[in-house]
Amino acid sequence: MEQIQEEDRADWARRMRSMFSSDDMVDISGNLKLDYFKPVERAAARKWTERERAQLQAGLVAHGVGQWKDILENFLPEWGAEDLRVQTRRLLGRQQLEPYISARYRPTDVAAIDRERSRNQQIGLGCGCWKGGQLVNDDAGRVDKLWRASFKPS
């Protein structure tokens, strides 16, 4: 009796797979194609060079945080806007870039970018919100309050 129920369940599962799954996922009988579920091999992530970091810093000085299109056109056309955002987070040491964008933050020079990273690190280490080399917000809003109190847009 149990074996019949098990066969009925397996048959039902195959029918459902055939009805609701794509052809590359299951065969005509509703059996899974295991190759479909193997992890996709991805190309190795491209690393930023020191020259490219310097170009991004120059772009931030020239155009400001958030001006990705201008920085791409004038300094780093081989990268994408998301790549610039991620690398800018690393340079500034701040996960959230929106406060910089809304303040139209434009560092005066490369040293200003380094100072901003140091300030963010000091805030993060002081309140336990320095994660993965970046200042991250806390639920209580303490990080944002400390950051805004000491932020001086250039």
Image (cartoon, rainbow, N blue to C red):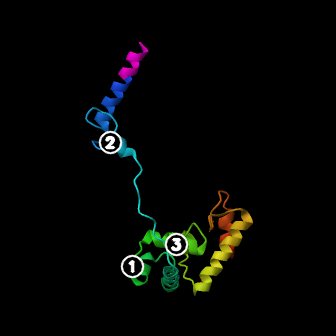
Residue 131 lies, in percent from the top left, at: 64, 63
Kindly tell me whether residue 35 is visible in this rendering. Answer: yes
Identify the mark nearer the N-term, 3 or 1. 1
Mark 3 touching mark 1, by CB under 8 A? no
Residue displayed at 52% across by 80% down: 50
Q: Which residue is mark 3?
A: 87
On residue 127, the disc is none
Q: What secondary structure predominates along the stretch shown in magenta?
A: helix
Q: Which residues are magenta?
A: 1-8
Mark 1 Cα-neighbour bin, 10 Å: few <14, some 14–19, many ≥20: few
Residue type at mark 2 is Met
Is-magenta flag for residue 5? Answer: yes
Front-most of 144 and 73? 73
Identify the mark nearer the N-term, 3 or 2. 2
Is-magenta flag for residue 151? Answer: no
Residue type at mark 3 is Gln
Where the C terminus falls, by quadrant? bottom right
Residue 70 lies, in percent from the top left, at: 42, 81
Under tag 2, what secondary structure?
loop
Mark 3 Cα-neighbour bin, 10 Å: few <14, some 14–19, many ≥20: some
